[in-house]
Image: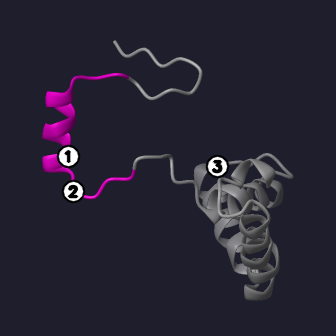
């Protein structure tokens, strides 16, 4: 059983951490949220779930169609520039909570 409280990482023995670090090289130390977490998933959910999907295949078709409708300009406008400005405003510190 693992206990995680108030967003702290689970506690585990140093020997286990060393073994995992040896087996899984260059693993991240944080959740590493990406622009997809802040933009794409919400946009897709809004587009795909306006009506209840009838089958898994129907859901897949809707997701593919919704992805095809997202333009490169939309991604540039909604993701890159906004995130860069927030990073500058936060002096390079964490800013995802501001999105």
Tell me the quarter of the picture where residue 99 sits. Answer: bottom right
Residue 50 drawn in magenta: no
Looking at the rendered structure, which numbered label has been put on residue 25? 2
Which residue is disc 1 drawn over?
21
Pointer 3 or 1: first along the chain = 1
Residue 71 spot, x, y in % from top left? 76, 84
Query: How many numbered markers are drawn?
Result: 3
- Disc 3 versus disc 2: distance between alpha carbons? 40 Å
Front: mark 3 or 2:
2
Looking at the rendered structure, which numbered label has been put on residue 55? 3
Tell me the quarter of the picture where residue 20 sits. Answer: top left
Marks 1 and 2 in Cβ contact (< 8 Å): yes
Q: Secondary structure at mark 1?
A: helix
Residue 16 spot, x, y in % from top left? 17, 30
Q: Magenta residues, as a range? A: 11-28
Marks 3 and 1 in Cβ contact (< 8 Å): no
Q: Secondary structure at mark 3?
A: loop
Q: Secondary structure at mark 2?
A: loop
Tell me the quarter of the picture where residue 72 sits. Answer: bottom right
């Amino acid at each position: 059983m693992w206990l995680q409280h108030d967003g702290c990482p689970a506690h585990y023995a140093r020997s286990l951490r060393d073994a995992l670090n040896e087996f899984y090289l260059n693993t991240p130390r944080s959740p590493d949220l990406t622009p997809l977490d802040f933009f794409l998933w919400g946009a897709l959910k809004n587009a795909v779930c306006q009506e209840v999907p009838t089958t898994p295949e129907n859901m897949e078709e809707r997701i593919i169609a919704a992805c095809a409708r997202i333009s490169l300009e939309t991604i540039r406008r909604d993701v890159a520039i906004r995130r860069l400005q927030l990073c500058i405003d936060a002096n390079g510190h964490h800013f995802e909570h501001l999105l």
